[in-house]
Each structure stands twice: as C-alpha cells, then as structure tokens.
C-alpha cells in the first residue's frame, strides 16, 4: 500500500491502530478493535426440562386473576359514576321533560295535565334531594300523581309500560316510595271507575244517546255496590263489568271481548268480575 500524496510506503502502527505514511507522515486510516466478551448466558437451545413449569403456570394464573379483579373494580366505579350522573345531572332536565310530554301524548293525556306533571316533577326534584332515585323514576311518580289527582283513566301499569318502552327501568315499588314525598292524594275508587267508564264509552261504537243511557245505568248500579266490595278491586275491570251489564240491560249489543279489548284487560278477569260483583 502506497501513500496517494507522496507515493511513500504506508505501514500499520499497531499501538495506535493507524495506517501512517513513512514518507510524509499522513495518517490514512484507523482500525478499531471491539473486544468481545463471552458471557455465561445459557444457550436458547438448552434443554428446557430444567424449567419450573408449575411456578410459571401459577404466576400466569395470578396475573390473569389480578387483571380480572382490576377490570371488575373499574366497572363498579364506572357504574357508580354513571348512576350519579343519571340521578343528579341537571343536563338531563330537558330530556326528562320531553319524555314526560312523549308519554302523555302516547297515553292520550291532554297537554294541560302534562304541564301539571312537569311542575310536580320540578318541585319534587327541588324538595326531594335525599331520594336515591333517577329523575326518570321521579318523573313517572309525578305523572301517576297527576293521573290520580285529576282522575284520569290511565292505570299505573300502562304508565310503567310506556316508560319501559322509552328505555327507563321504572317499577310500581319505585312509585310507591316517591309519591308520599309529593303530597296526600284524595280520590275514591268510585271516581276511578266512573273515569274509566267515560273513557271506555268514548271508544265504543255507541251513539251519544246510548252512551248517556249506559253511563246513567252504571252510576245507578255502582250506588248499589258497597264500599267493602269495591275495596281492593281493579277499577278498570270493574268499570268494564258495569258497562257490560248496563248495555245488556238496555238491550245494546256488546260482547265481553269488545269491552276487554277496549280497556286492555284480560277477558278471563272481566268474566270473573261480571259473575262475582255485578251479576249476569
């Protein structure tokens, strides 16, 4: 090897690891030696029979159990947060008031009663901070209160069914817990029966004169039934039974099937009420 500058001979300085020209002294190249150390690390191809598989399996199971427990705790925390947001989030007000209006519209409740229910709901929320209930359950209780106070021909069963259809879990037990917070309700079973009677007659294929005659007949029959007999009875079914009896006495054509479908009740229960309480 010769120097490109002076054409001199190039030699290797072993001490410094450099190629040096003997003529002009230019350092042309360097060599680096990287020391390689052999470790005592086991070969990847070593016999695996020495491994402790039992302890390894236990560790894997322990890690999996810890991960599942962590997920469960996280889910519980998120559920608590979700319940608090659903129960006490003021951003839900608009949606809940809209829900009250939608349910009222589906049940055929007039707009003025819907506004009354909205006021009851807002007042109950303001006063009932200690209630561990979602706003939708409080809204359902406000509607039931409105129905009972104004004697509307709507049952709690129908109301709960519509709230469930909207995706809200409401039970009769929830309503029983909340309604006492609103106030005392003064209504009678007789008033509820007459309310359902008016509703059913408006749906049946009777003339205005026939409706009036049936309604008067229902009032007369109802006066003959004692309070003890009325106690604990379903006012909707009893109203249907009274309408059926009155229509038969007046010579009008009305079947048990028609009246049961009109009020959305069981024909078996209706037949039983007719037999027991209003006669054939």
Image (tube, rainbow, N blue to C red):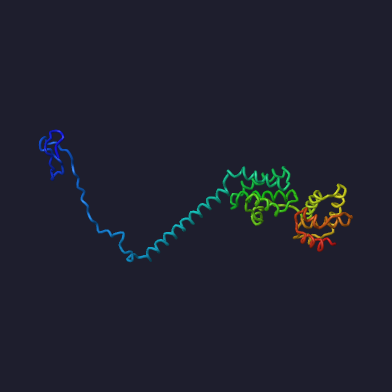
Residue found at the very far top of the displayed protein = 5
Q: Position of residue 128 (x, y in %)?
A: 61, 49
Q: Position of residue 127 (x, y in %)?
A: 62, 48
x and y percent of residue 133 in the render? 60, 52
The answer to whether residue 32 is left or right of residue 79 is left
Instruction: Work out whether 111 lies above or below 224.
Output: above
Give above or below for 170 relative to 112: below
Q: In the image shown, does 6 or 88 lie closer to the viewer?
A: 6
Quadrant of the frame with the C terminus = bottom right
Would you identify the image quadrant in which residue 1 lies?
Answer: top left
Query: What is the tally of numbered marks visible in this picture?
Result: 0
Q: Taking 88 as reference, is 270 left or right?
A: right
Residue 178: x and y in percent read 64, 53
Q: Residue at x 39, y 62 (%)?
A: 59
Between 189 and 43, which is closer to the camera in this rendering? 43
Q: Nearer the viewer, residue 88 or 160?
A: 160
């Amino acid at each position: 090897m010769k120097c490109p500058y002076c054409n001199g001979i190039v030699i290797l300085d072993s001490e410094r690891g450099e190629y040096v020209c003997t003529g002009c002294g230019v350092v042309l190249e360097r060599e680096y030696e990287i020391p390689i150390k052999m470790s005592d690390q086991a070969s990847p191809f070593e016999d695996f029979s020495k491994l402790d598989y039992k302890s390894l399996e236990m560790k894997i199971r322990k890690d999996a159990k810890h991960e599942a427990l962590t997920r469960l705790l996280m889910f519980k925390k998120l559920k608590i947060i979700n319940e608090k947001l659903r129960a006490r989030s003021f951003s839900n007000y608009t949606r809940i008031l809209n829900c009250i209006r939608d349910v009222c519209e589906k049940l055929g409740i007039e707009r003025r009663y819907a506004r009354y229910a909205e006021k009851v709901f807002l007042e109950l929320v303001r006063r009932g901070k200690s209630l561990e209930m979602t706003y939708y359950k409080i809204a359902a209780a406000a509607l039931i209160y409105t129905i009972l106070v104004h004697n509307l021909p709507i049952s709690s069963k129908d109301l709960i069914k519509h709230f469930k259809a909207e995706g809200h879990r409401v039970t009769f037990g929830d309503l029983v817990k909340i309604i006492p917070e609103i106030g005392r309700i003064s209504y009678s079973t007789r008033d509820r029966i007459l309310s359902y009677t008016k509703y059913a007659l408006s749906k049946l294929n009777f003339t205005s004169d026939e409706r009036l005659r049936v309604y008067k007949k229902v009032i007369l029959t109802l006066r003959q039934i004692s309070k003890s007999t009325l106690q604990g009875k379903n006012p909707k079914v009893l109203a249907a039974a009274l309408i059926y009896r009155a229509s038969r006495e007046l010579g009008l054509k009305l079947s048990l099937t028609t009246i049961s479908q009109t009020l959305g009740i069981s024909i078996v229960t209706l037949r039983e009420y007719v037999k027991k309480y209003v006669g054939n």
